[in-house]
Image (cartoon, rainbow, N blue to C red):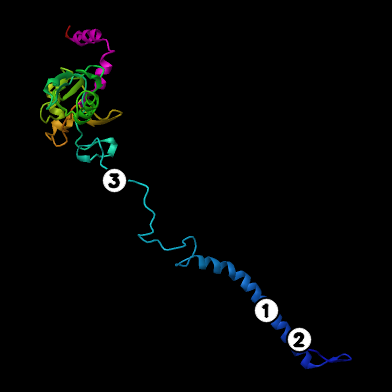
Amino acid sequence: MSCLIRGTVVSFACKAAKAEAMKLTSLGLFGVFAALLFQPVYEVARAQETGPNRGVQYEPVTPETKVPEQFGPATSQPNGADGTGNPSLGRERRPLYRLANSDVLEVSFPFTPEFNQSVTIQPDGFITLREAGHLVAAGRTLEELEQSIVTPYSQILHDPHVTVKLTDFERPYFVASGEVVRPGKYELRGGKTVSEALAIAGGFTTQSQRSQVVLFRKVTPALVETRVLNVKKMLKNRDLREDPSLRAGDLIYVPRSTISKIMRFMPTTNMGMYATSATF
């Protein structure tokens, strides 16, 4: 576009043409700037779309294309009865009995009875088997011990079958200690409560703190629960609903009262002389 300039006079048509050209130029620059600004936003929005080649997912996942899991099938807890182990505080629900020292076992071979024998678990936890040597038994269940006995006898017998029977073992017990008349270890027969156990141990002494009786209960070999019982209040209110039942291995401890601790260091002879001086 050209404009004719005569002297110092510029035609009106030329001014209008220049203004239109500047307007178009400004719109063009704005369009380029908007395109540059919109491109990153467009890429982000496109990456979040579904379908093939969108973002990091290159193809839809279907049951046929799903990567197999690296974990095996769920299995039951081997040491819990019926596979119902309870992980709370490491406990087992209905745990199987584990052999201990001095337990007496009857080892039977149904098809080769000449190998039948009776063994006792020694203080070191071993048993001595005929023609098979020494074998660890303490800490194992009967089923685990049967499997362990099969291994050495497989070198002597063909496909041996072994049955282990527990004939004698340490009876369930509880221990009463502290300020009771007869502290010691007592056999636990049937369902006994703390108050019944204290009665078996002869009851409290005159120096006992009956409101702070402590019950110790072993949960695992490394964990012990404790519970403080107010036996004095329980018996005074004749309310035995909070009288807990004992379990094998429980320990009941009755502490000494505070006044009895002080009385140990008081001169009882002088107190007696002072008490009788008023009669003269």
Magenta span has 268? yes
Element carrying mark 2: helix
The image shows residue 49 at horizontal and vertical percentages of 47, 67
**Which span of residues is magenta-colored?**
249-278
User: Marks 1/2: CA distance?
Assistant: 15 Å
Element carrying mark 3: loop
Q: Residue at x 23, y 7 (%)?
A: 269
Looking at the rendered structure, the kind of residue marked 1 is Gly
The image shows residue 36 at horizontal and vertical percentages of 63, 70
For residue 18, the mark is 2
Q: Nearer the viewer, residue 277 or 129?
A: 129
Query: Where is mark 3, residue-wise?
Result: 74
Q: Determine crowd level at label 2: few under 14, some 14-19, many 20+ residues with C-alpha closer than 10 A.
A: some
User: Marks 2/3: CA distance?
Assistant: 82 Å
Looking at the rendered structure, the kind of residue marked 3 is Ala
Q: Residue at x 62, y 73 (%)?
A: 34
Q: Tell me: 110 left or right of 56.
A: left
Q: Determine crowd level at label 1: few under 14, some 14-19, many 20+ residues with C-alpha closer than 10 A.
A: few
For residue 28, the mark is 1
Q: Quadrant of residue 261?
A: top left
Image quarter in which the N terminus is found:
bottom right
Q: Is residue 8 above or below residue 273?
A: below
Q: Quadrant of residue 230?
A: top left
Camera-side mark, 2 or 3: 3
Looking at the rendered structure, the kind of residue marked 2 is Lys
